[in-house]
Amino acid sequence: MNDDFYNPWHGCRKYSEGCVNCYVYRRDEAIGKDASQIYRTASFDLPVRTGRSGSYKIPSGSHLFCCMTSDFFLEEADPWRNEIWEFIRQRFDVDFTIITKRISRFMDCVPADWGEGWDNVEICCTVENQRQCDLRMPVFLSLPIKRKKIICEPLLGPIDFHDFLTSEIRQVSVGGESGDRARECDYDWILDIRRQCQEKGIPFHFKQTGASFRKDGRLYRLSRADQLNQARKANIDLSG
């Protein structure tokens, strides 16, 4: 399966604790842009574009991460979202992953024929700390979604998932915060989430350490490449 990014709009508004050092704001600031300015991009209709032969430029079997420089359920995107649902409906041969902090808006933003969910849409709810876990997880578990994942990134503290790790959850992915102003991520928090997943038989993925990573009482500053490499070397993923 080919993985790629699909950003139909760009820009966002900071929403919760995980947004403080947002990578989109950081990257835009570096080139003199204001990430709070929200606009449709030139890639808006990417999934349904065709080449000269009439075949889709995005091949069947591809996997698109949608809205990685914004939030799919951002209020300012309400006028545009229905068109994206039409593209997703048209491309049932392509998988779409949507990661959101605005899970509370989900039912106000899905198409009328959503039903129990679409087979080609994966919804990932971001849970960065205990407060957001307690707020978002009851909502997330109540929603008609066929493919649910939890993203703990940036992980900002220990999280007790209580009874929220049910068989509906296909995976929990964990990662620290990147960037020069990254807040600390403690390996003990990661291991405890892994333990909770293991007890419930939920797949677990350690994506990255973050730039400021504490392990065995020692604080490390890691480059972007090392953040990913050290997570892989830890070899603590669980297949469920």
Image: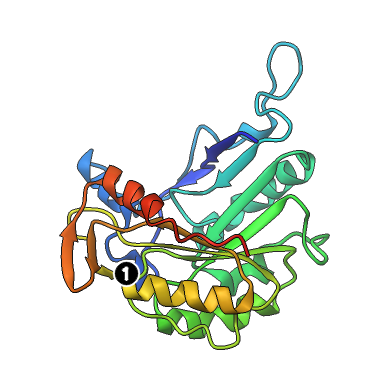
Task: Please tell me in which quadrant of the rendered image residue 53 appears.
Answer: top right
Category of crowding for the residue at label 1, using alpha-carbon neighbours closer than 10 angstroms: few (below 14), some (14–19), many (at least 20): some
Q: Residue 153: image x %, image y %?
A: 41, 63
Q: Nearer the viewer, residue 64 or 185?
A: 185
Give the residue displayed 57% in from the left and 70% down from the top.
Answer: 103
Badge 1 amino acid: Tyr
Q: Which residue is mark 1?
A: 187
Instruction: Answer with left or right where residue 229 lies relative to residue 64.
Output: left
Residue furthest out toward the top: 52
Instruction: Answer with left or right where residue 192 lies relative to residue 139.
Output: left
Q: How is the image coloured?
A: rainbow
Instruction: Answer with left or right where residue 102 lies relative to residue 59.
Output: left
Q: Which quadrant does the N terminus fall into?
A: top right
Q: Residue 126: image x %, image y %?
A: 49, 67
Instruction: Answer with left or right where residue 173 lies relative to residue 171.
Output: left
Q: Nearer the viewer, residue 118 or 218?
A: 218
Q: Residue 69: image x %, image y %?
A: 43, 48
Q: Which quadrant does the C terminus fall into?
A: bottom right
Above or below — where is 60 with respect to 80? above
Q: Nearer the viewer, residue 77 or 227?
A: 227
Task: Please tell me in which quadrant of the rendered image residue 36 appears.
Answer: bottom left
